C-alpha cells in the first residue's frame, strides 16, 4: 500500500479521529495535508519538466544541423523563452516546494504545515498560471519570444501572449510567496520541543534561508514585469526609451531578482546533498555550523552580485570591479560547502546506492559549473563569453547537474518513505549513468561553442559550429529519454506500490525524524509533539 | 574498479566514434580566418592587445581551476576508493575541526584575490576609450548595423551593413549543398578601419537592445536604444574579422553579423577617397534597391 496513491484504505493507517478526510478527487482538490500537497507539487513539477524538456528538444532539433529545418526563427525564440520560463518557474521551483512540503514537517516533528489551507491555495494557483503559460503558444503571434529574462524594450514588440505570460508570472510569484511564508512560519513555530535551530537538518535550514530569499525578491520581479505591462498598455515609460525610459534599469531590477533566484534554485539542493552524503558515508556531516553559515553568506552575497549579468551593458569601471569582486567572493562559501561534503565522505564507510550516486554526481558536475562561474565572474573574460553558449553551458551545469541531480538524489533517498516500497536499485543506476553521460555529452561541447563565440538564442549558426551542435543535440535527446525512463521505470511502479516493502529506515546511516515514522509515512504524523533525544534525531517517547 | 574502467572505455569509444562520424559526414567547411574555426576549442586568435590579455587571463584562470579540480577530486575519488564499506572501512567519528575549516575558508579567499589582481588591470584598460584616432558610431537596427564615421579620417561616411541576402535564403533552405565558409557572416558593406589605430566604437540602437561584438578584438558592447555606450580596439594586423549580434533582438537575431575589414593606412586612405568621391551615391542606390521597409526606416533614422 503506497502513501501516494492509496485507494480507500489510507485512513486505516492513520489515527482514529481522522475519519472525515475526503477521498477520490476531493482528496486532491481540497488537499490540506502536507504530504498530499507535496505529492501534487512534485507531480506538477515533473509534468512541467517534461513540457520544458520537449521545448528544449525542439531547440536542439533545430540546432542539430546548420540552416533552418524544423522551426522558423520566430518559433525558435518562443521555444528558448518558454523553455526557460517553464523550467525555472514551473519545474525547479515547485519541485523544491514539493520536497519542502513533504519533508519539513516530518523533519522537524510537526504535524503539518502551519497554514494548511493557504498551502492548498498556493498549489492550485499554479495550475491556471501554468495553463496560461503553455497556452500562450496558441495566442495570436505565438508565445513570448523575448527570452526568459524578458528584456525591455523587446517586450514592447511582443503580442498579447506577453501579457498572459506576465500575468502567469504574477500568479506564480504570489504562489511562491505564500509557500515561503508557510515554510518560514512552520519552521520557526512548529518544531518539536528540543529541535533547536542549530539541531535542524540542513534541508530545513537551507529552505528557511531560501524562503527568506523568495520573499525578498519575488516582489521585485513582480514590480519589474508590472512596469513592463504598464509600459506596454498604459503609456508609461519606465523602460521604454521612446518616452525617456531606461532599458538598462529593467536589467538592474530583473537581475536584482534574478541572481538571488539562482540561489533559490540551488540552496535546497545543497540541503538535500547535505543529508544524503552523511547517510551513505555513515558519518556525521562535517562542519554542520559552517554549512549553515556558508548558506547564510551565499544568500546575503547573492544580493550584491546582480550586475555581473550585465558587464557588457557598459558599466563604469568601479561598477565592473565591484561586481567582479563580489561575485568572486561567492566562490569562498561555495567552496566551503564542497570541502565539507568531501570531508564528510573522508574516512567514512561509504556505499553507493542510487541517492549517493546522484549526490556524488552532483558534487562533481556542480563543481565544474562553479569553476566556469568563477571564470565568468572575471569581467574581461566575461566580455568574450557574455551571451554565448559558454553561459548556457555554465548555468545548465549548475541548474541541471546542480538542482535537478540533487532532486533526483532526494527522490531516491525519500521515495521509500513516501511510497512504502523500495525502488529498483538497477533501474536507479541505469537512470543515473544514462543521465550523467548524456548530460555531459549535451552540455560539455557548449563550452567550446561559447569560447569560439557562438551566441546563444540563435536559430542558425556559421558552419564551423556544426559538429559540436550535432553532438549536443544527440546528447539532449538521450538525456530527455532518460527522464522518461525514470518516470516509467521508477516513479510509476513506486506510486503503484510495486517493489520490496520498505523498512522504516532503509538506509542504515540515515538520521532524522523522518526515519522515526513508518514507511510509507502515515497520513498524519507527529500529531502530538514527539519527545526527542539530545541530538533531536530520535523520538524517545 | 572494473566497472569504472569499462564505463570509461565505453564512453571514450563512443565519443571517438561520434566525433569521427561527424567529421566525415558533416558539411565540408574550412576555418574562417578572423572568424570561427572548425571545431574550435578555445577563444579566437587575438588581433588586439586586449583580446590577448583576455586570452591570457582565461588560461591563467583555467590553470588555477584545473589545479583545484585535480586536488579536490583527487581527494574525493581517493576517499571513494578507499573509504568504502565494501572494503571494510569503519567510519571515523570526527565531524568538525575549527583549524581545517578556517584554513579552507582563508586559502580560497587568498586564491580569489590572486585572481582578481590581473583581472583588475584589464578591466581598467578596457574602459579607457580616450584619445581615439577614429570614432565610429554603430547603430543597431532590426536587423542590420548602421555605421557612421564621426571623427577622424573618413569623417562623414555612413552606410548600412546587412547580411548577404543569399545567405539568409540559404538558411531558409536548410543550408543544403555547398555552403560558403563565411556562411551567415558575409555582409554587403563591411566596417572598414585602419590597422594600428585606436578605434572608438560608439554604440546605440534605434529599436531594441543589440550587442556589437568582435571576438578577435575582445570587444562586446550592448547597443541600447536611447543611450550611447562605447568600446575601443586597436587592430594589430590587417584582415577580415567577424562577429555577430550578441543580444536577443527579435526573430532575425541570428542574421545581423558584423564584418570588420582592417586595412593598411594607405589602403584605408584610398577607401576613404573612393567612398567620399561619389561612391556613397552608388551605395545609396544599392541600399534603395535592397528596398525593404526596414532599410528605408533605418536610413531615415540615420539622417536624423
Image: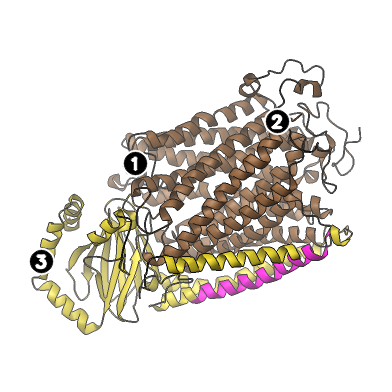
Chain colours: A brown, B yellow
Which numbered dot is residue A158? 1
Residue shown at 48%/31% (left/top)?
A131
Residue A436: where, in percent of width, then height? 63, 56
Kindly report the distance in space between the C-alpha atoms of the residues bearing marks 3 and 2. Answer: 74 Å
A453 relative to A274, above or below:
below
User: Residue B35 — which label?
Assistant: none
The chain identifier of the residue carrying mark 1 reads A
Give SS at disc 1.
loop
On-image quarter of the C terminus of chain A? top right
Q: Which of B121 and A211 is in front in this view?
A: A211
Which residue is at the front of the view, B92 or A307? B92
In the displayed structure, would residue B40 be above or below residue A506? below
Q: Nearer the viewer, mark 3 or mark 2?
A: 2
Question: Are the two marked residues, 3 and 2, in contact with CB atoms closer than 8 angstroms?
Answer: no
Q: How many labels does the image show?
A: 3
Circle 2 is placed at which residue position?
A4
The alpha-carbon separation of the residues under discs 3 and 1 comes to 37 Å
What residue is pinned by disc 3? B282
Chain of the residue where label 3 is placed in the rendered structure: B
- The secondary structure making up most of the magenta span is helix
Residue A310 visible, this orientation:
yes
Where residue A505 sits, quadrant-wise, is: top right
SS class, disc 2: loop
Is residue A382 visible in the rendered image? The answer is: no
Amino acid at each position: 500500500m503506497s502513501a501516494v496513491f492509496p485507494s480507500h484504505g489510507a485512513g486505516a493507517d492513520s489515527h482514529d479521529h481522522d475519519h472525515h478526510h475526503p477521498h477520490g478527487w476531493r482528496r486532491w482538490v481540497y488537499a490540506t495535508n502536507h504530504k498530499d500537497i507535496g505529492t501534487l507539487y512534485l507531480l506538477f513539477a515533473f509534468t512541467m519538466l517534461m513540457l520544458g524538456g520537449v521545448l528544449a528538444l525542439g531547440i536542439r532539433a533545430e540546432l542539430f544541423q546548420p540552416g533552418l529545418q524544423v522551426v522558423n526563427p520566430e518559433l525558435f525564440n518562443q521555444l528558448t523563452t518558454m523553455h526557460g520560463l517553464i523550467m525555472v518557474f514551473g519545474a525547479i521551483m515547485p519541485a523544491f516546494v514539493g520536497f519542502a512540503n513533504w519533508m519539513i514537517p516530518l523533519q522537524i516533528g510537526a504535524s503539518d504545515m502551519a497554514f494548511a489551507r493557504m498551502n492548498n491555495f498556493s498549489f492550485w494557483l499554479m495550475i491556471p498560471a501554468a495553463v496560461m503559460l503553455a497556452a500562450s503558444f496558441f495566442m495570436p503571434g505565438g508565445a513570448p519570444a523575448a527570452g526568459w529574462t524578458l528584456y525591455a524594450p523587446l517586450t514592447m514588440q511582443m503580442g498579447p501572449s506577453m501579457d498572459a505570460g506576465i500575468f502567469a508570472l504574477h500568479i506564480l510569484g504570489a504562489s511562491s510567496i505564500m509557500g515561503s511564508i508557510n515554510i518560514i512560519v512552520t519552521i520557526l513555530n512548529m518544531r518539536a520541543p528540543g529541535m533547536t535551530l542549530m539541531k535542524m537538518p540542513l534541508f530545513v535550514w537551507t529552505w528557511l534561508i531560501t524562503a527568506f530569499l523568495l520573499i525578498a525578491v519575488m516582489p521585485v520581479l513582480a514590480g519589474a514585469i508590472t512596469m513592463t505591462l504598464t509600459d506596454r498598455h498604459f503609456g508609461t515609460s519606465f523602460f521604454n526609451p521612446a518616452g525617456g525610459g531606461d532599458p538598462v534599469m529593467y536589467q538592474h531590477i530583473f537581475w536584482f531578482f534574478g541572481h538571488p533566484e539562482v540561489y533559490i534554485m540551488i540552496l535546497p539542493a545543497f540541503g538535500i546533498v547535505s543529508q544524503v552524503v552523511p547517510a551513505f558515508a555513515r558519518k556525521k556531516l562535517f562542519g554542520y555550523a559552517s554549512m549553515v553559515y556558508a548558506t547564510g553568506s551565499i544568500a546575503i552575497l547573492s544580493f550584491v552580485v546582480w550586475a555581473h549579468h550585465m558587464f557588457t551593458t557598459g558599466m563604469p569601471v568601479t561598477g565592473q570591479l565591484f561586481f567582479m569582486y563580489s561575485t568572486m567572493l561567492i566562490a569562498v562559501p561555495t567552496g566551503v560547502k564542497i570541502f565539507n561534503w568531501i570531508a564528510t565522505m573522508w574516512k567514512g564507510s561509504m556505499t553507493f546506492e542510487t541517492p549517493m550516486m546522484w549526490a556524488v554526481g552532483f558534487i562533481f558536475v556542480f563543481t565544474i559549473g562553479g569553476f566556469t562561474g568563477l571564470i565568468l565572474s572575471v569581467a574581461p573574460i566575461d566580455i568574450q563569453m557574455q551571451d554565448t553558449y559558454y553561459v548556457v553551458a555554465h548555468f545548465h551545469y549548475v541548474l541541471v547537474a546542480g538542482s535537478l541531480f540533487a532532486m533526483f538524489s532526494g527522490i531516491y533517498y525519500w521515495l521509500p518513505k513516501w511510497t512504502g516500497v523500495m525502488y529498483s536499485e538497477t533501474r536507479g543506476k541505469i537512470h543515473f549513468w544514462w543521465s550523467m553521460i548524456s548530460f555531459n555529452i549535451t552540455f560539455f561541447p557548449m563550452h567550446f561553442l561559447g569560447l569560439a563565440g557562438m551566441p546563444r538564442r540563435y536559430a542558425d549558426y556559421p558552419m564551423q559550429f556544426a559538429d559540436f551542435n550535432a553532438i549536443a543535440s544527440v546528447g539532449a535527446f538521450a538525456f530527455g529519454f532518460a527522464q522518461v525512463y525514470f518516470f516509467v521505470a521508477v516513479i510509476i511502479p513506486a506510486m503503484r506500490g510495486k517493489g520490496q516493502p520498505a523498512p522504516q529506515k532503509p538506509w542504515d546511516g540515515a538520521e532524522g525524524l523522518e526515519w522515526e515514522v513508518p514507511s510509507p509515512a502515515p497520513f498524519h504524523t507527529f500529531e502530538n509533539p514527539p519527545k526527542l533525544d539530545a541530538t533531536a534525531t530520535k523520538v524517545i517517547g | 574498479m572494473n566497472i569504472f574502467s569499462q564505463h570509461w572505455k565505453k564512453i571514450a569509444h563512443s565519443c571517438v566514434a561520434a566525433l569521427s562520424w561527424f567529421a566525415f559526414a558533416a558539411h565540408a567547411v574550412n576555418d574562417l580566418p578572423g572568424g570561427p574555426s572548425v571545431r574550435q576549442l578555445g577563444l579566437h586568435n587575438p588581433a588586439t592587445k586586449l583580446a590577448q590579455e583576455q586570452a591570457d587571463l582565461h588560461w591563467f584562470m583555467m590553470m588555477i581551476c584545473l589545479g583545484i579540480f585535480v586536488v579536490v577530486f583527487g581527494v574525493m575519488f581517493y576517499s571513494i576508493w578507499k573509504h568504502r564499506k565494501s572494503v571494510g572501512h569503519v567510519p571515523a567519528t570526527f565531524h568538525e575541526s575549527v583549524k581545517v575549516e578556517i584554513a579552507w575558508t582563508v586559502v580560497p579567499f587568498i586564491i580569489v584575490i590572486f585572481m582578481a589582481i590581473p583581472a583588475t588591470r584589464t578591466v581598467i584598460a578596457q574602459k579607457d576609450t580616450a584619445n581615439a584616432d577614429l570614432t565610429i558610431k554603430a547603430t543597431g537596427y532590426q536587423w542590420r548595423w548602421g555605421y557612421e564615421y564621426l571623427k577622424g579620417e573618413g569623417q562623414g561616411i555612413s552606410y548600412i551593413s546587412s547580411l548577404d541576402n543569399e545567405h539568409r535564403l540559404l538558411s531558409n533552405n536548410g543550408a543544403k549543398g555547398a555552403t560558403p565558409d563565411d556562411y551567415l557572416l558575409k555582409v554587403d558593406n563591411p566596417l572598414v578601419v585602419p590597422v594600428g589605430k585606436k578605434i572608438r566604437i560608439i554604440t546605440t540602437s534605434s529599436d531594441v537592445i543589440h550587442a556589437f561584438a568582435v571576438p578577435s578584438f575582445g570587444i562586446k558592447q550592448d547597443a541600447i536604444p536611447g543611450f550611447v555606450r562605447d568600446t575601443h580596439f586597436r587592430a594589430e594586423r590587417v584582415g577580415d574579422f567577424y562577429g555577430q549580434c550578441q543580444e536577443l533582438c527579435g526573430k532575425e537575431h541570428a542574421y545581423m553579423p558584423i564584418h570588420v575589414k582592417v586595412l593598411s593606412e594607405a589602403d584605408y586612405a584610398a577607401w576613404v577617397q573612393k567612398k567620399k568621391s561619389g561612391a556613397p551615391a552608388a551605395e545609396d542606390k544599392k541600399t534603395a534597391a535592397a528596398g525593404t521597409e526596414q532599410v528605408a526606416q533605418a536610413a531615415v533614422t540615420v539622417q536624423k
